[in-house]
Amino acid sequence: MPINAGYEYAEAQKRLDDAKTNEEKIRALEYMLSVSPSHKGAEKLRLEIKTKISKLKTKIEKERAKKTGGFSIAIKKEGAAQIALIGIPNSGKTTILNKFANTKALVADYEFTTRMPEVGVMDYNGIKVQLVEIPAIFLGFNESNKGPSLLAIARSADLIVIIIDGTRDCEQQIKIIELEFSKNFVVLKKLKSNNREGYETRKCLVIVNKILKNFKCEYPVSWVGDFKDAVWTMLDLIYVYTKQPGREKDFPPVALKKGSSVGDLARIVHHDFIDKFKFARVWGKSVKHNGSNVGLEHKLKEGDIVEFHVK
């Protein structure tokens, strides 16, 4: 037992000893982590607990794949970011995919039209963003044949977008999705912090489709008409342009993380630009005067135009 561990830790150890299934062991370890000492001397202990939790989760996922015939699927990420569209049956996911990614996926008024992930590419001011529609989620989805693999696609995406049918019980739709992700050891990030020991926290946006009924939402929320801007805002990305001296700006622009510098852009544009860099001229919101000379550390803002000058 670690130094300064109280009776709660001893109780957690007893729960772990009595646990029969891997799921029970994970719950016991999560409790143990929550009551374990938080001082510096207990860092190794906490790391060991987290490692055990991670290994048990991996073991559970492998066992599920084996029981379901080893079904596995992966979607290669393309563009600046990958967005997973999820929702209950007939929430409008396919309609949104077709509208914003110019796809022609089947839309019907019966449930479970989408059987496998549908993929499209959305254009945002020249930046390509990949949209992946996950088949409809239902109670027990995680225990279904393809459920774990399909949820794994969503958890690996840069943003999870929940499509809500505003004509139905909005809170219930979200609860179903929360529950199925929880079974997969994932919590969706709310407006207020809701981190959970032993769980992954994934960024999430709620898009209300069809007619809106008033409901309390603990997640960032927007509407179909603002879909593109809302998704882009949640990604924490900016787009900037490059140009050559004496010419107009190049197209398409380049996607960067918010807070990126001229040096970050230089590394993307050409591997020699850093070593041969003299200065850059910038037009846009990040400078007081258009055409200002700046160095590699200058922070860029969305829509900036950058002209590199090298030795």
Image (tube, grey):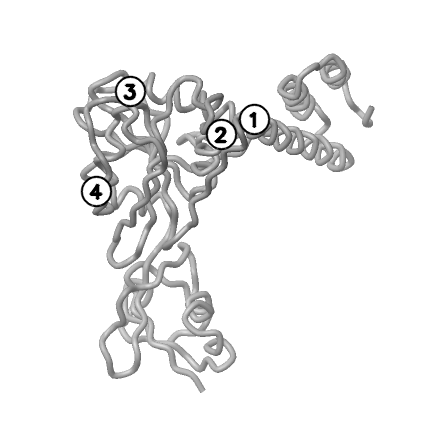
Secondary structure under tag 4 reads: loop
Q: Quadrant of residue 179?
A: top left
Circle 4 residue: 104
Q: Mark 3, residues whose alpha carbon is within 10 Å: few (<14), some, or many (≥20)? A: some
> Alpha carbon of mark 3 to alpha carbon of mark 2: how far?
24 Å
The circle on residue 64 is: 1
Nearest to N terminus: mark 4 or mark 3? 4
**Are the residues flagged by discs 1 and 2 in contact, CB closer than 8 Å?**
yes
Q: Nearer the viewer, mark 3 or mark 2?
A: 2
Looking at the rendered structure, the kind of residue marked 4 is Lys
Q: Is residue 100 left or right of residue 57?
A: left
Looking at the rendered structure, the kind of residue marked 2 is Pro
Instruction: Indicate the position of residue 45 as horizontal and vertical percent values.
Output: 75, 32
Q: Mark 4, residues whose alpha carbon is within 10 Å: few (<14), some, or many (≥20)? A: few
Q: Residue at x 43, y 42 (%)?
A: 157
Nearest to N terminus: mark 1 or mark 4? 1
Q: Nearer the viewer, mark 1 or mark 3?
A: 1
Instruction: Indicate the position of residue 66 as horizontal and vertical percent values.
Output: 58, 29
The residue sitting at the front extreme is 69
Nearest to N terminus: mark 4 or mark 2? 4
> Alpha carbon of mark 4 to alpha carbon of mark 2: how far?
26 Å
Q: Nearer the viewer, residue 33 or 125?
A: 125
> Alpha carbon of mark 4 to alpha carbon of mark 3: how far?
27 Å
Up-down relation of residue 81 to residue 251 (above or below): above
Instruction: Indicate the position of residue 189 as horizontal and vertical percent values.
Output: 44, 32
> Alpha carbon of mark 1 to alpha carbon of mark 4: how far?
33 Å
Circle 3 residue: 170
> Alpha carbon of mark 1 to alpha carbon of mark 2: how far?
8 Å
